[in-house]
Amino acid sequence: MTNEPIALDDAFASFDALWSPRIVSRVNDYDVRVTKVRGEHVWHVHDDTDEFFLVLDGELRIGLREAGGERTVVLPAGSVFTVPRGTFHKPSSLDGARILLFEPTGTLTVGDRHDEVPAHVDATTGHELG
């Protein structure tokens, strides 16, 4: 990690992989991750941590399995949403999006429990930028 400003456009330009977040900074014990997304992720749950999403460009949909049933939240650019710990969720983006995430360092992108991980989803704790 560098202690220099990071231009997010430059960070995004440094990789092409979808659903494969890059760690741009750390705040205490949390990673600040950016990723490009298109298509569907996988249903998964983080048992012990919330997951924060900020949509920078495009539109992100997050399917949620809650006590009252399933619903989908729609996040246009500039929107934020936090998936509560213990909630199964499935992000997707029809036309693609660029998002920023806050997650505890070491959090796996497919959570603690998940459906079968498709080949286009990178099951990772994040990649260093650069």
Image: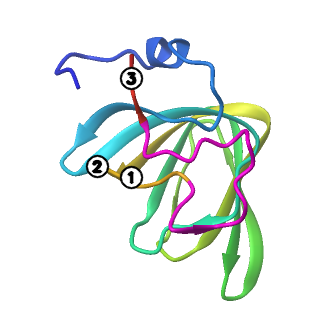
87 or 22: which is nearer to us? 22
Which label number is shown at residue 30?
A: 2
Mark 3 → mark 1, Cα distance in angstroms: 16 Å
CB under 8 Å between callouts 2 and 1? yes
Q: Secondary structure at mark 2?
A: strand
111 or 68: which is nearer to us? 111
Q: What residue is at 62 percent from the left and 65 percent from the top?
A: 44
Q: What residue is at 44 percent from the left and 20 percent from the top?
A: 8
| Residue 81 in the image, given as x and y percentages of width and height | 54, 56
Residue furthest to the right? 94
Q: Nearer the viewer, mark 3 or mark 1?
A: 3
Q: What residue is at 70 percent from the left and 76 percent from the top?
A: 65
Residue denoted by label 3: 129
Q: Amino acid at mark 2?
A: Tyr
Q: Amino acid at mark 1?
A: Glu
Q: Amino acid at mark 3?
A: Leu
Residue 14 on the magenta segment: no
Q: Secondary structure at mark 1?
A: strand
Residue denoted by label 1: 103
Crowding at mark 2 (Cα within 10 Å: few <14, some 14-19, many 20+): some
Q: Earlier in the sequence, mark 2 or mark 1?
A: 2
What secondary structure is the stretch in magenta mostly built from? Answer: loop
Q: What residue is at 28 percent from the left and 49 percent from the top?
A: 30
Q: Earlier in the sequence, mark 3 or mark 2?
A: 2
Q: Earlier in the sequence, mark 3 or mark 1?
A: 1
Residue stretch rendered in magenta on the structure: 110-126
Quadrant where the N terminus is found in the figure: top left
